[in-house]
Image (cartoon, helix red, strand yellow):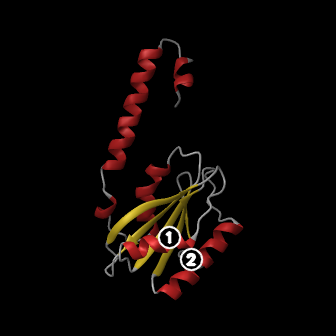
């Protein structure tokens, strides 16, 4: 919902429109803050999706995050590493694994969104996943999954047998 759209509704002026947008934003923040990422028990790609779908909701650009885990798969940290365009995010494994080493992570999960809502991996997504897996193997850090989040759905490279 935008200010422009609200102002087109009969009976809503600038003040009321701003109040409505403020309430929407507060609701989004409360919804995201209900669970801290470190409180989530990662049992599946769906558990990651359920957390990140609210973060990626309404994003018009691609965002690439990594979740870094310890030896017991407990979350150490999550970090947004790259912000791209409407259909592309330039990701370099160097940054992904630098963060893993800085946080003493033993494994990681890569996550990014597709603003189009379509979660089918692109050629670049598949190539990046292969590259991350190769580097992970060399460095002794496990790549547990790469998850693409779209509108109300996700794609897991692990669940689809690519990892």
Image coordinates for residue 162, horizontal then vertical, percent:
60, 78
Instruction: Tell me, yes or no, whether the two marked residues, 2 and 1, touch with CB atoms within 8 Å.
Output: yes
Quarter of the image for the C terminus: give it.
bottom right
Q: Which residue is mark 2?
A: 132
Q: Which residue is mark 1?
A: 96
N-term-proximal mark, 2 vs 1 = 1
Determine the residue positioned at 44% across, 49% down: 54
Image coordinates for residue 140, horizontal then vertical, percent:
46, 87
Residue situated furthest right in the rendering: 123
Residue 54 lies, with reference to residue 90, above or below; the image says above
Residue 34 lies, with reference to residue 68, above or below; the image says above
Q: What label does residue 19 carry, if any?
A: none
Image coordinates for residue 2, horizontal then vertical, percent:
53, 29
Determine the residue positioned at 65% across, 63% down: 120
Q: Quadrant of residue 68?
A: bottom left
What is the crowding at mark 2: few (fewer than 14 residues within 10 Å), some, or many (at least 20)? Answer: many
Task: Point out the frontmost of discs 2 and 1.
Answer: 1
What is the crowding at mark 1: few (fewer than 14 residues within 10 Å), some, or many (at least 20)? Answer: many
Determine the residue positioned at 64% across, 51% down: 85
Image coordinates for residue 117, horizontal then vertical, percent:
61, 52
Determine the residue positioned at 36% across, 42% down: 29
């Amino acid at each position: 919902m935008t200010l422009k759209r609200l102002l087109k509704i009969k009976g809503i002026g600038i003040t009321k429109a701003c109040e409505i947008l403020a309430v929407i934003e507060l609701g989004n923040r409360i919804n995201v803050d209900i669970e801290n990422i470190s409180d989530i028990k990662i049992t599946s790609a769906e558990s990651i999706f359920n957390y990140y779908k609210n973060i990626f909701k309404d994003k018009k650009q691609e965002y690439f995050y990594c979740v870094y885990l310890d030896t017991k798969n407990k979350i150490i940290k999550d970090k947004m590493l790259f912000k791209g365009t409407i259909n592309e995010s330039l990701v370099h494994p160097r940054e992904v694994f630098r963060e893993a080493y800085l946080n003493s992570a033993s494994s990681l999960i890569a996550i990014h969104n597709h603003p189009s809502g379509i979660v089918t991996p692109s050629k670049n997504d598949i190539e990046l996943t292969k590259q991350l897996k190769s580097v992970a193997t060399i460095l002794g850090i496990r790549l547990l999954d790469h998850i693409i989040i779209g509108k109300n759905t996700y794609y897991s490279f692990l669940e689809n047998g690519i990892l």
